[in-house]
Amino acid sequence: MNFNYSSKLLESAVNEFATLPGIGHKTALRLVLHLLRQDKSALENFGSVLIKLASDLNFCKICGNICDVDICPVCADQKRDHATICVVENIKDIMVIENTQQYHGVYHVLGGIISPMDGLGPADLNINSLEERVKEGTTKELILALSATMEGDTTNFYLYRRMNTYNLVFSTLARGVSIGDELEYTDEVTLGRSLVNRIPFSASSSS
Amino acid sequence: MNFNYSSKLLESAVNEFATLPGIGHKTALRLVLHLLRQDKSALENFGSVLIKLASDLNFCKICGNICDVDICPVCADQKRDHATICVVENIKDIMVIENTQQYHGVYHVLGGIISPMDGLGPADLNINSLEERVKEGTTKELILALSATMEGDTTNFYLYRRMNTYNLVFSTLARGVSIGDELEYTDEVTLGRSLVNRIPFSASSSS
């Protein structure tokens, strides 16, 4: 649906919102009109937060996580286990893992996974900086927490081959039936894998 | 889902997006991370467009439509029929009507409809400015293009009672079966009304 905007300003704001994923021109217009119904200061605030984000946002010099200063809160936390590095695809994965409250090591953000289809090779990812960290000799375990896809597996394999010389323990996330799932609805590949990789039963591991 | 943000800046940007209708924190985070993957200038541009919108946006002094200058393009267009005023609820309705390319008069934005449930009375709407326009004597027809709801009907009735003294033709949008609709799926009220208000058949009026 094309609109004739009576205001160029309105149109440019709608166009900005329409660049966002999952937001078309109709939704964008609804969002902008919603903002216009608010206080003027709310709109100014929205704008200045975005500008501040562009100018002030940093990425952690160690792990590549998003942060306001040079080193992110996780890397700066001396209580965490700095000998265990969890390798993730992007910063959203860090948030999801942090939310489980089950991990107490540090992270490394690759910024993607090896995907020839998208033209992403090892050189496009933050693998060199990971190798630098590992070379320091304090790292004991590398948890490869990438997507359970062909590309994720390829990246896991590449990292294993490249870092294997540094005397590390490699691990990946356990793959199996989701907690709460009924077997009937679990896909065959996952179910097959979780049979092959079955684990000793203990009272605490059952859901 | 609560996230621990490693960056206050990121968190405030996510919170801004999450104030928008239909956008929760998870979607907001996805949008902000999408913006961060773009060029820095894109983010700055997005922000400055919003700030410019807050500072520079005007509403037409005549009809209340959104515009960049004092008078909106519709009111400024001398080719349009200034004797016919189409009364609408909000500026989005203007865009929708303009899109039909079937209307060549001018508009008046009420900024809402009378809705005691929401605490909106006639005094909260741009009715005084409409009366001022009508008082000038050049207006011949008032098209009441409000929602086909109880509140819309109430507002129509109020406007009719108040402006009836000015020797105007009042009209409302035709209500009936939507073009492309099958009778089977048309609601009874609409179908009943469209029977009562049936129109003479002509080759051009059939769909």
Image: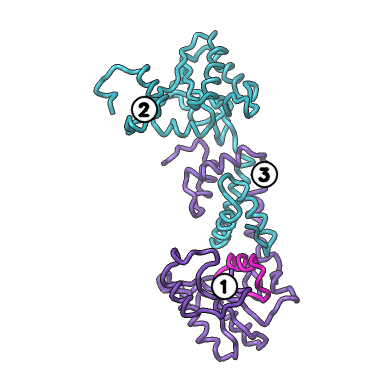
Chain colours: A purple, B cyan
Q: Are marks 2 and 3 in contact (CB under 8 Å)?
A: no
Is A75 on the left-hand or right-hand side of B204? Answer: right
Amino acid type assigned to the residue bearing label 2 in the image: Val
Amino acid type assigned to the residue bearing label 3 in the image: Ala
- The verdict on residue A96 being magenta is yes
**Magenta part of the chain:** A89-107
Q: What residue does disc 3 label?
A: A42
Q: What residue does disc 1 label?
A: A88
Q: What residue does disc 2 label?
A: B177
Residue B117 in the image, given as x and y percentages of width and height: 62, 27
The residue under the point 65% across, 21% down is B123
Is A66 on the left-hand or right-hand side of A195? Answer: right
Residue A130 in the image, given as x and y percentages of width and height: 59, 80
Q: Chain of mark 2?
A: B
Q: Chain of mark 3?
A: A
User: Which one is in front, B119 or A91?
Assistant: B119
Q: Residues within 10 Å of mark 3 (few under 14, many from 20)?
A: some
The answer to whether dots 3 and 1 both sit on one chain is: yes
Q: Are marks 1 and 2 in contact (CB under 8 Å)?
A: no
Residue B84 in the image, given as x and y percentages of width and height: 46, 19
Q: Secondary structure at mark 3?
A: helix
Residue B114, quarter of picture: top right
Where, quadrant-wise, is the C terminus of chain B in this rendering? top left
Camera-near label (2 vs 3) is 2
Q: How far separated are the C-alphas under marks 1 and 2?
A: 56 Å
The residue under the point 58% across, 65% down is A92
Residue A9, quarter of picture: top right
Total residue callouts: 3
Amino acid type assigned to the residue bearing label 1 in the image: Val
